[in-house]
Image (cartoon, helix red, strand yellow):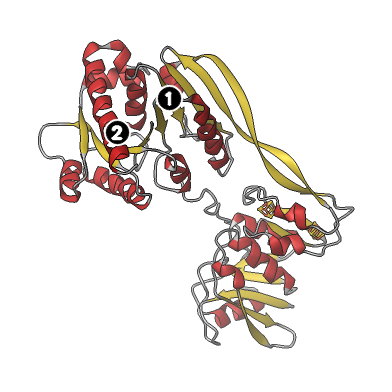
Amino acid sequence: MRIAVLSGKGGTGKTLISVNLAAAAQTSIYVDCDVEEPNGHLFFKPEGVQDEETAINIPSVDEELCNGCRICVDFCNFNALAYINGKLKIFEEVCHSCGGCALFCPENALSEKDKFIGKVQKGVSDNVTVNTGILNIGEASGIPLIKKLLNENELAGGSPTFIDCPPGSACIVMESIKDADYCILVAEPTLFGVHNLNMVYELVKLFDKPHGVVLNKCLEGENPAEEFCLEKGIRILGRIPFDDELGILNSNAQIAVREKEKYRTMFSSLLQIVTEEVRHETVANP
Amino acid sequence: MRIAIPVDEKSIGASVCQSFGRAPYFLIYDTDSKESEFINNSAAASQGGAGIKTAQAVVDYRIGALLTPRCGENASEVINAANIKIYKTTDASAPDNINAFINGKLSLLDEIHRGFHNHGSK
Ligand code: SF4
Ligand code: SF4
């Protein structure tokens, strides 16, 4: 069971919810796909951490061999190559590592070299296996890292997996939810919250993913995000109250479920609701 | 010398296109022969790297100067590698900008914007 946790922007409680759900499960895997700013590991403080560098293949040119035929420039669908002033220029951030240019170069002037873009870090925090993707600063795309994080996860067998997605709804988020069985959308009770919720709601609809909403920071009174859910007929999975104690635990990077019985109860019942939803979905749409 | 300027349509009073890589056409003007010519920018429809491909096409036209309201980082790298100078256009029409350039009234484009290469993730 793979559960992706999303929100339209950062700071809505995406990490709070994915971390606590993972901690509330008997055994679980927490995958931090927010590779530009991974922070789940700050809560879990995993032990026995191992790093694995992740590289992508980028072409490099041997200028002695290149005769300027430009076959590679015309071939590249992503326009990552230009031939200027008698020299081939390679735009590494634009390259999608398809390998085509090296294959088609008639002079064998292109070869592939490794470019390290970040690392995958794995460790254990009690009942939770913590896998974190960390993108090197300045790298344009974390997608190769996410692919690696989620592929490896395949091996881990039966435990539920909680995927802490990057904020927003861009292609990096799509990559993160691609193989998810269920998507939890986290929303704040404001008009901005509705706007952000709508972004991710459109995305999960596009991907045809079963989904539900967790309303975070709930106060007494009106909740525009709740109204939005009722209007669109979106399942509300739970409500997390706006509560100082939870806020303090969270800002001290403590896991609420591990500190207080009442939060364990709260997240365990949320987990149960989500698990039932997933089971229901697999029965209804196997 | 030939100069290039991104335009919105193929007409002599054309307005300057606000985007370099996504401009549908370029007006190429030859200051010696005083002839002008429109070229289609096939890169405008590319999914990514439009600026690089456009810059390549413009460079291949052996121009001496590019007049444009803005230019992305990658595109300007290509243009600079070809030793072509980039000048910033004003709000006036393309022909007025060409005249302004000939009279030495346009300044170099110094603010190069970072582009949208993060796939819009932020
Ligand atoms: S295809 Fe090979 S020889 Fe031709 S321009 Fe590219 S690198 Fe040079
Ligand atoms: S590997 Fe593919 S994307 Fe990268 S430069 Fe070569 S053809 Fe373009």
User: Observer-nearest residue: A259 or A243?
Assistant: A259
Tell me the quadrant of the picture where the C terminus of chain B can be found: top left
Q: Is residue A165 above or below residue B109?
A: above
Which of the two labelled residues, at mark 2 and mark 1, occupies the earlier sequence position? 1
In the image, is A206 to the left or to the right of A187? right
Helix, strand or loop under label 1:
loop
In the image, is A265 to the left or to the right of A148? left
Q: Quadrant of ligand 1?
A: bottom right
Chain of the residue that carries numbered disc 1 in the rendered image: A
- Where is residue A5? Give x, y as percent: 36, 35
Please tell me in which quadrant of the rendered image residue A244 appears.
Answer: top left
Q: Which residue is mark 1?
A: A158
Q: Is residue B82 visible?
A: no
In the image, is B61 to the left or to the right of A170? right
Q: Disc 2 versus disc 1: distance between alpha carbons?
A: 14 Å
Q: Who's the residue at 55% across and 79% down the image?
A: B94
Please tell me in which quadrant of the rendered image residue B112 appears.
Answer: bottom right
Callout 1 crowding tier (Cα within 10 Å): few <14, some 14–19, many ≥20: few
- Where is residue A50? Give x, y as percent: 59, 19
Q: Is residue A17 visible?
A: yes
Q: Is residue A154 above or below residue B70?
A: above
- Where is residue A70? Give x, y as percent: 77, 64
Q: Which residue is mark 2?
A: A279
